[in-house]
Image (cartoon, grey):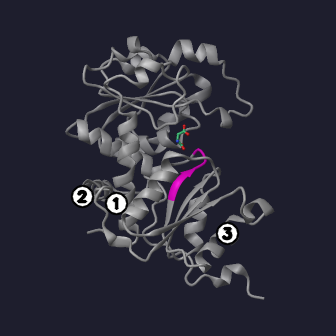
Amino acid sequence: MPSAGRQVASRGSARGSLLGIEGVSTAEIAKLLQLARKMNPQRPRPLLRGKRVLLLFYEASTRTRVSFEIAAKALGATTTLVLSSGSSIEKGESLLDTAYTLRAVGADLMVVRHPNAGAPHLMAAHVDIPVINAGDGMHEHPTQALLDAYTILRHKRKLEGLQVAIIGDIYHSRVARSAIHLLSKFGAKVVLCGPQELLPELATTLAPGLRITRSCEDAVRGADVVMVLRVQRERLAGLKVNLQDYISRYQMTMTRLRLAKNDALLMHPGPIIRGLELTWDVADCPQSAIVEEVRNGVPVRMAVLARALGKAK
Ligand code: ASP
């Protein structure tokens, strides 16, 4: 019996994969953002007609999953969703055997979300089709960083020199990690803010020039962009975080937000927990780009999919 692994044509080829922002050049990011500006989900383009996009989600998702699906369909591809519950994953099938199976049924591209860092990288090293990381554990969430950059650039002329405050559970956040890499590459001044348990000093080693502050007021003062993150209770495990204390020190309130520039953008990758990391009025304030971020996820993911399959025109 041949092993499942031998059914794969050429190991490690996975050209077109997007696994993280860390290893992507500014030129490549700029190209993706430029392509995203040409994508209009209301005006579908059949660039990926006949292509099969597999959405493999081992973790909960609303925005990312749905926008990848809508993006793929807007480009004429067909999509198939595989969730860990209700599939052979529940029976103990390994990640790679699932990948080989999906390739064998004709997948042209896989979008993967997984609780373990590096899972999409492992798949990309073993299948001969592009793999797009839709969030791997506490590691990276590259398409979120791209859509956030796209959103910021719709309001600000450039990323260089912008003062960006990232506040909250940075330790568990793949969104923060990808955003830090992207913003730093483009010369934004990134300030990280949160309590010790959710923001270890080590975080400054992620990119050059990062600053850490434990004071929310200090982080927000004069900021062009305020990015608020959810406390990832599902990943807290042994960590002890006093939520009442967190709310009093780090919750984004209108009083705190007013310390930022008048035209500052309020961002959050979602899902938002009103009353915890931000107040109701902050979530709905005129500066809030939260809904816009979700909307921008579609053209950005259209660009990522088209580019991955070599159809970027
Ligand atoms: N939706 C984002 C993620 O999947 C952020 C979050 O869950 O808080 O990482």
Which residue matches tag 3?
98
**Secondary element at tag 1:** helix
Residue drawn where x is 25% and y is 53% of the image? 37
- Return the residue at label 1: 303
- Looking at the rendering, the quadrant in which ligand 1 lies is top right
Asked whether, in this view, residue 5 is left or right of residue 201, the answer is: right
Q: Is mark 3 within 8 Å of ligand 1?
A: no
Whether label 1 lies within 8 Å of ligand 1 gets the answer: no
Residue in view at x 33 percent, y 14 percent: 258
Answer few, some or many: residues within 10 Å of disc 1's Cα (few below 14, many 20 plus, some between 14 and 19): many
Q: CA distance from mark 2 to mark 1?
A: 8 Å
Q: Secondary structure at mark 3?
A: helix
For this rendering, which residue is in front, 14 or 212? Answer: 14
Q: Position of residue 55 (x, y in %)?
A: 55, 61
* 2 or 1: tag closer to the N-terminus: 2
Q: Which residues are magenta?
A: 133-138
- The circle on residue 38 is 2
Residue 170 image offset from top left, x and y in percent: 53, 33
Between the residue at mark 3 and the residue at mark 2, the CA separation in whole angstroms equals: 34 Å
Q: Amino acid at mark 1?
A: Ala
Residue 21 falls inside the magenta stretch: no
Determine which quarter of the picture holds residue 244: top right
Q: Nearer the viewer, residue 218 or 49?
A: 49
CB under 8 Å between discs 2 and 1: yes
Q: CA distance from mark 1 to mark 3?
A: 26 Å
Q: Is the C-beta separation of discs 3 and 2 under 8 Å?
A: no
Amino acid type of the residue tagged 3 in the rendering: Thr
Q: Looking at the picture, does residue 272 appear above or below residue 24?
A: above
Q: Is residue 257 above or below residue 68?
A: above
Q: 120 above or below 267?
A: below
Q: Position of residue 260 (x, y in %)?
A: 32, 19
Find residue 271 and name its label: none
